[in-house]
Image (spheres, coloured by chain):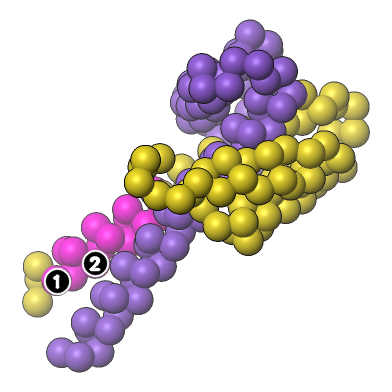
Chain colours: A yellow, B purple
Amino acid sequence: VAEERERTRTTVDIYGEQYTIVGDENPDHVRKVASLVDEKMREIKRKNPYLDTKKLAVLTAVNIVNEYIKLKDHFDQAHKANKEDEEST
Amino acid sequence: VAEERERTRTTVDIYGEQYTIVGDENPDHVRKVASLVDEKMREIKRKNPYLDTKKLAVLTAVNIVNEYIKLKDHFDQAHKANKEDEEST
């Protein structure tokens, strides 16, 4: 996080608890991110009703990292294919 | 998760606790994902030493969703620029 940027403090509710997120993102973006995490936690809880909140949060993070890697691989592949296309024309 | 694929069970250690991840990913991939989550949790804990593990895990998920959205926006922009390039040639 760059020092020269303006710092925002946004309070959000995730899975029934309040969190104050400090950063350089605008509050609307922070609220969108928080609501995606809240949603994902509830989705995983429905599939694993026995999980306590700590394990639920850790498994939510695992899920999101997995999706992050998939997205990155997908775009890296697309980029590679695109580059090869360009080189062959 | 597709029914026809093979289901794997991989036990991983994240922030001192064991989790059994069930899915269709190979165990090496699951271990890579788990170690990224573990790393991220330790990084956030260093910056916020007062956080309990539950809040730490939730904030880790928030961080990763934020990075996911940034990555997606970045690639969407690149894709759009690339498309415009193609259309103009």
Q: Which residue is mark 1?
A: A86
Instruction: Say left or right for A3 vs A50.
Output: left
Instruction: Report whether residue B76 is seen.
Output: yes
Residue drawn at 62 percent across, 41 percent down: A21
Q: Residue, x 77% and y 43% (percent of image)?
A: A14
- Contact? badges 1 and 2 (CB < 8 Å): yes
Q: Position of residue B2 (x, y in %)?
A: 67, 49
Q: Give the chain letter at badge 1.
A: A
Q: Amino acid at mark 2?
A: Asn
Q: Is residue A58 left or right of residue B65?
A: right
**Is A82 in the magenta?**
yes
Q: Are marks 1 and 2 on the same chain?
A: yes
Question: What amino acid is labelled 1 in the image?
Answer: Glu
Q: Which residues are magenta?
A: A73-86
- State the residue in front, B82 or B40: B40
Q: Residue at 71%, 27% (x, y): give it.
A: B55
Position of the C terminus of chain B, as image quadrant, is bottom left
The location of residue A48, given as percent across then percent down, is: 84, 34
Q: As rendered, which of A36 and B6 lies closer to the eye?
A: A36
> Which residue appears farthest toward the bottom when viewing the image?
B88
Image position of A64 with respect to B89: above or below: above
Quarter of the image where one finds residue B79: bottom left
Q: Position of residue A9 (x, y in %)?
A: 61, 45
Rate crowding at label 1 as few (under 14), some (14 to 19) or many (20 or more) other CA atoms within 10 Å. few
Residue A42 in the image: state x and y as whole percent.
82, 44
Q: Which SS type dominates the magenta stretch? A: helix
From the viewer's side, name the closer residue of B22 and A31: A31
Secondary structure under badge 2? helix
Q: Is residue A59 visible?
A: no
Kindly report the distance in space between the C-alpha atoms of the residues bearing marks 1 and 2. Answer: 6 Å
